[in-house]
Amino acid sequence: MIGHLRHVKPIYGWGWVNADGATRDTPVPFRLSCDHANALEGTVVDTHEFSGATAHLSPRHTTDGYFNVEIRRNAAPIAQGYAEA
């Protein structure tokens, strides 16, 4: 069941990397299924390379809407980067 959807728009920022630290392309935008509208964690939904994975958002500043993002699948990191949400 989806409680709230949070739209995440990955941007280049300092670049995106895979779990091994290798540079990767910036992912396309995705949506998170979350418990509430301002949740900092959720499951990636829809057809996406991260579908089913958990995304953790860490605010870069208190009010600007930019976040460090870590994507995990089964608790193992698979990618990290920067996004608007």
Image: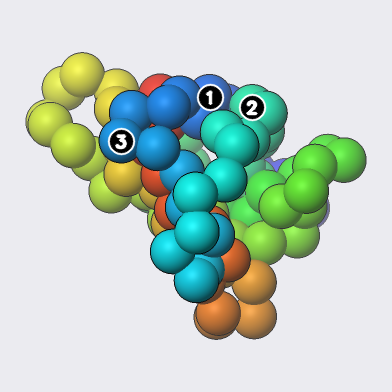
Q: Are marks 1 and 2 in contact (CB under 8 Å)?
A: yes
Q: Who's the residue at 45% across and 25% down the image?
A: 11
What number is the disc on residue 14? 3
Q: Amino acid at mark 1?
A: Lys
Q: Residue furthest bottom?
A: 75
Q: Amino acid at mark 2?
A: Pro
Side (left or right) of 16 relative to 51: left
Q: Are marks 3 and 1 in contact (CB under 8 Å)?
A: no
- When asked about the image quadrant of residue 26, the answer is top right
Q: CA distance from mark 2 to mark 3?
A: 17 Å
- Mark closer to the observer (3, 1): 3
Q: Which residue is mark 1?
A: 9
- Mark closer to the observer (2, 3): 3
What number is the disc on residue 29? 2
- When asked about the image quadrant of residue 24, the answer is top right
Q: Earlier in the sequence, mark 1 or mark 2?
A: 1
**x and y, in percent, of residue 10 in the image:** 51, 29
Figure check: 8 above or below 72: above
Q: Earlier in the sequence, mark 2 or mark 3?
A: 3
Q: CA distance from mark 3 to mark 1?
A: 15 Å
Nearer-the-camera pick, 49 or 53: 49
Quarter of the picture containing the C terminus is top left
Figure check: 1 above or below 38: below
Please tell me whether mark 3 sits on a helix, a strand or a loop.
loop
Nearer-the-camera pick, 77 or 85: 77
